[in-house]
Amino acid sequence: MTYNLEKYRGKREKVLGVKKRGISFGALASIVSLVIILGMGVVVVPKSIAYFNTRHLDDAIYKLQSADVWPPDIITGLNDLIGVKEVVKDSHDTRLVVTFDKSITDTKNFTAFFKQKEVKTILLNRVSHTQRLKTLKKEAKFEGLLQ
């Protein structure tokens, strides 16, 4: 008959003074790694979602050559074009920012639209939508410091 280790385990641990306290190293390591992974997920996931939502968006900034205010029918006409996400006037109504999906349309279509409506415009800048938002945020922060 062989010696059964499990049969006398309790007695051996009692004699040797082995006590089970706390959690094991494997459980502790699992908890720490889970906290690190979830913390990184909270930081990275929103930025990734924002990037995927705006990766195809560009902004084209236009100004009228005559320095007048933008007619409302031009703005509604631009909003109706395919691929245009948003059309915004600046605070002085002199510049127009057209946010569009660059995989669907391009500034050439806007130029053709302006020629069709017989409006003379100047393309001031074409910039990534996320870059423009970052610039606006920096400008707002800078203006807040000046006041």
Image (cartoon, rainbow, N blue to C red):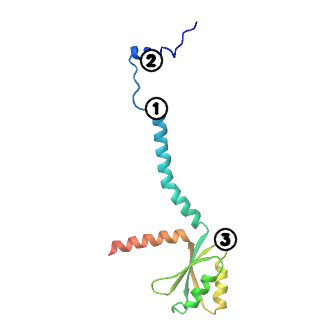
Q: Where does the C terminus fall, quadrant-wise?
A: bottom left
Name the amino acid, label 1: Phe
Residue at the spot of label 2? 10
Q: What element carries label 1?
A: helix
Q: Earlier in the sequence, mark 1 or mark 2?
A: 2
Q: Measured from the top left, where is residue 30 in percent x and y?
A: 49, 38
The extreme top residue here reads 1
What residue is rendered at 55% in x and 61% in y?
A: 49
> Depth-wise, is mark 2 or mark 3 nearer the camera?
2
**Mark 1 and mark 2: Cα distance apart in space:** 22 Å
Give the left or right position of residue 88, taking residue 13 as reference.
right
What residue is rendered at 47% in x and 35% in y?
A: 27
Residue 120 badge: none
**Above or below for 86 versus 116:** above
Q: Which of 91 and 124 is in front in this view?
A: 91
Density class for disc 1 (Cα within 10 Å; few <14, some 14-19, many ≥20) is: few
Density class for disc 3 (Cα within 10 Å; few <14, some 14-19, many ≥20) is: few
Q: Earlier in the sequence, mark 2 or mark 3?
A: 2
Name the amino acid, label 3: Ser
Q: Measured from the top left, where is residue 38 in percent x and y?
A: 49, 49
What residue is rendered at 54% in x and 93% in y?
A: 66
Residue at the spot of label 1? 25
Residue 103 badge: 3
